[in-house]
Structure formats: C-alpha cells, structure tokens
Amino acid sequence: MTADEILQKMAKEGLRITEQRKTLASLFSDAEGYLTPKDVYEFMGKRYSGLSFDTVYRNLRLLHDMNILEQFVMEDGVKFRVHCSEHSHHHHLICLGCERTLPVAFCPMETGCEVPDDFQVVRHKFEVYGYCGECRSGAQQP
Amino acid sequence: MTADEILQKMAKEGLRITEQRKTLASLFSDAEGYLTPKDVYEFMGKRYSGLSFDTVYRNLRLLHDMNILEQFVMEDGVKFRVHCSEHSHHHHLICLGCERTLPVAFCPMETGCEVPDDFQVVRHKFEVYGYCGECRSGAQQP
DNA sequence: CTTGTTGCAAAGCGTTTGCAGTAGA
DNA sequence: TCTACTGCAAACGCTTTGCAACAAG
C-alpha cells in the first residue's frame, strides 16, 4: 500500500490531508517492520518540532479504525504496520532482529490440527519468531 | 500444581508464607482460566480489607520470576495462570467464553511448516481461539 | 467560512517505587 | 530478634480527553 493510496482512502472518508498525515502515510508505506507509537513520534518529531504524542495516537487510532493499519499487542508494547496486501490467508515469520515479516502460506488449521468436536473454532494465531537471513549475516543478532 | 506445592516451592526459596500468599496460592491452583491482576485483587480483597494493588503485583511478579506462574500479554491486558503441568511440548485451545484452556498435542512446526533456509527459527506461537463445549451449551457465548 | 485537526494541559489507567510499620521465621 | 513482607503514598509510563487556536476544504 503506497502513501498515496492511504491518503486517498482518508480523503474519501472526508478526512483532511494535513502535512503530518502525509508524512505518516509515507512512513508506514515505507516501513518494513512494526512501528510503536514512540517510533512514529520520534520520526515525525524530526520534521514537526511542536509535535505532540496525542496527535500521533489520534492518527494511529484513526488509521487502525479505517482498517489501514494492523495493531499488534506484543510483550514490549503495542505496534502498528500496514495491513498485509496479500489476499489469501497466511501467517508470518517475524524477525526478532529487525522485526520484518515474511509471509508463509502454511496454515496449521488446514493441515491436520484436530480439535475436539464440541470446540467451535473462531480464530487462530500462528507466528514463527527467529532471525532472518539478513540479520543472521549481520551483527544485529543478540 | 496444588496450593501446597506452590507454597513449598516458595518456602524452599526462603520466602515467607503469609496468609495472603496462602490465599494467592490456592486461588491460582484452583483457577481454571487466566487471571488478571484486577481479578486477583478483587478476589483477595474479599478477605483482606486493607489489601493494596502493589502487593498483588509484587506477588504476581515474584511467582512469575519463580517460574510458577505463566504470564500472557493479551489484547485486553496481562493475565496469569499456573504453568502447564504437561511435560511435552503442546499448544492450546483457548475458550473465549470462560478462558479455560485445552491442550493440543499437534504442533505446526513438526508438521510440515516450511521456512526459508536462511531463517533461523527461535520460537513459535500457535493458539486456537473459540468456544468450548460447556460455553456453547450454556448462554455465555456473546 | 465551516468543520476537522492540532497542541497544550490535564487526567486516566495500569504498574512500579521508597519508606516506615508489621509480622513471619 | 532479624529480615521479609505489607500498606501507604507517590511516581511512573503510556494513552486518552477537553478545550481553544489553527488550517484544510
């Protein structure tokens, strides 16, 4: 999802395209991993000296409500990223070094996971954590 | 894990067995699902009028550090439960109604999930959410 | 011009800390 | 007795709110 696509979607909803939102849109469309509100605040703060945290939160919530951003609750806090563009159901490999994600088509629910008859499955979560090739060759691995 | 086992483990570490900790131990050993700090505070508050939240947090952290309690970061907050007694690697079905968990032996990592050669897997998470038989027959389902 | 957006300040919530009194071993 | 534990109060970090000034359409 490009920055322009995000902005168009916002404009279509009657939202105003401010300078800040332009920066926010391109930040997320360029981001390869997850961003915390703090990440966003620090990045945006470089350009907007008077930036306040509440505006960051307001815009993050807005984009999340508009289904543009996905929100994850991780152990070290809340993180955001643009919704996966892939249409088919899939899961992710998540790099512990750079937090980039790689899609995996494999889904455990389609491959033999047996649940008791009386358990009604609503949703499931399958995530693999580790280090991507780039982080393994570099020195980022803890 | 029984309340006594928890208390013995604490005593062995040189910790003191207070009335509050006795209650806490039996609360967790009897609990079928996850408990939030607030749950614990409210339950314990019934017996100890002057109870304070910080003591609840201190004891939860203590039991977590001692590897007696497991801590989960869920979307609606942090929750605790006693560590699974099962020895073998397994995953869980989690009931959205009563939050009880059912173990499943199936593990996606042992059943054909293919990851790129250069991705080094460290850990994984597989959880199935839904409604257990009891909650389906009752009226607890939203 | 009209209404959405922003920054500020303040409050909210969940969690942690320092301290002095209390109670377990 | 001695030291760990507790409650109190206060502080903390993250997030949300009300309000008045501002800027996009």
Image (cartoon, coloured by chain):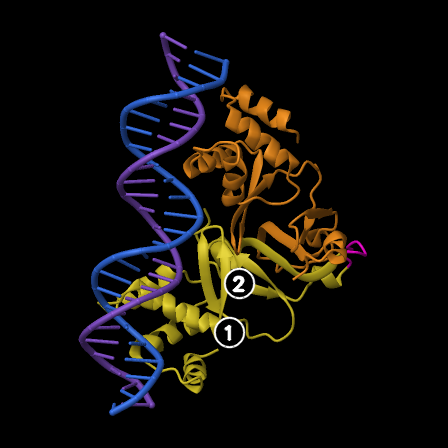
Chain colours: A yellow, B orange, C blue, D purple
**Is residue B60 shown to the viewer in this render?**
yes
Q: How dense is the environment of label 2, judged by Cα within 10 Å: few (below 14), some, or many (20 and up)?
A: some
Residue B42, compared with residue A76, is above or below; it is above
- Tell if the residue under mark 1 belongs to the same chain as the one under mark 2: yes
Mark 2: amino acid: Thr
- Number of labels in the image equals 2
Q: Residue at x 57, y 56 (%)?
A: B119
Mark 1 or 2 closer to N-term?
1
Name the residue that disc number 2 marks.
Answer: A101
Q: Chain of mark 1?
A: A
Residue A67 tag number: 1
Pointer 2 indicates a residue of which chain?
A: A
Res B27 quadrant in image: top right
Q: Position of residue B134 (x, y in %)?
A: 75, 52
Alpha carbon separation for disc pair 1 and 2? 19 Å
Magenta-drawn stretch, dominant element (helix, strand or loop)? loop
Q: Residue furthest right?
A: A117
Question: Which amino acid is tagged 1?
Answer: Asn
Q: Residue at x 69, y 43 (%)?
A: B89
Q: Secondary structure at mark 1?
A: loop
Residue A30 inside the magenta-drawn segment: no
Left or right position of A124 against A129:
right
**Mark 2: which secondary structure?**
strand
Q: Is residue A127 left or right of residue A9?
A: right
